[in-house]
Image (spheres, grey):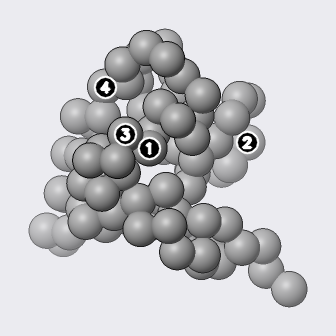
Amino acid sequence: MEPVRTCIGCRSRAPRASLLRLVARDSDLVVDHTATLPGRGAWLHPSIECFQDALRRRAFGRALRVTSPLDAKQLENRLNWLMDN
């Protein structure tokens, strides 16, 4: 049976393979493609809608247990590029 994770944007459960794992590196949100980077991770559908929902709900900092502001611009650009292609 495939592992199931919860998207921090839409809060729905999905197979791990269909979600992106995110970690905080310094003050940036980084996509962890191999799901092996150290530290606490958060899971997000690769859609701009879930990204915007997570931003609106301030879910990134809460899920990653980070109190400082996180720069999500690189992640947003990546998701926009994925949606365009």
Q: Secondary structure at mark 2?
A: loop
Where 66 sits versus 32, above or below?
Answer: above
Q: How many residues crowd around disc 2 within 10 Å: few (fewer than 14), some, or many (20 or more)? A: few
Where 78 sits versus 20, above or below?
Answer: above
Q: What type is the residue that disc 2 sits on?
A: Thr
Check if mark 1's residue and mark 3's residue have beta carbons within 8 Å: yes
According to the picture, the residue beneath numbered tag 1 turns out to be 59
Q: What type is the residue that disc 4 sits on?
A: Asp
Q: CA distance from mark 2 to mark 4?
A: 21 Å
According to the picture, the residue beneath numbered tag 3 turns out to be 58
Q: What type is the residue that disc 1 sits on?
A: Ala
Q: Is residue 3 left or right of residue 79?
A: right
Question: Measured from the top left, where is residue 14 in percent x and y?
Answer: 59, 77
Name the disc covering residue 36, or none.
2
Q: What type is the residue that disc 3 sits on?
A: Arg
Q: CA distance from mark 1 to mark 3?
A: 4 Å
**What's the residue at 86%, 86% (across, down)?**
1
Check if mark 2's residue and mark 3's residue have beta carbons within 8 Å: no
According to the picture, the residue beneath numbered tag 4 turns out to be 71
Question: Measured from the top left, where is residue 63 in percent x and y?
Answer: 57, 41
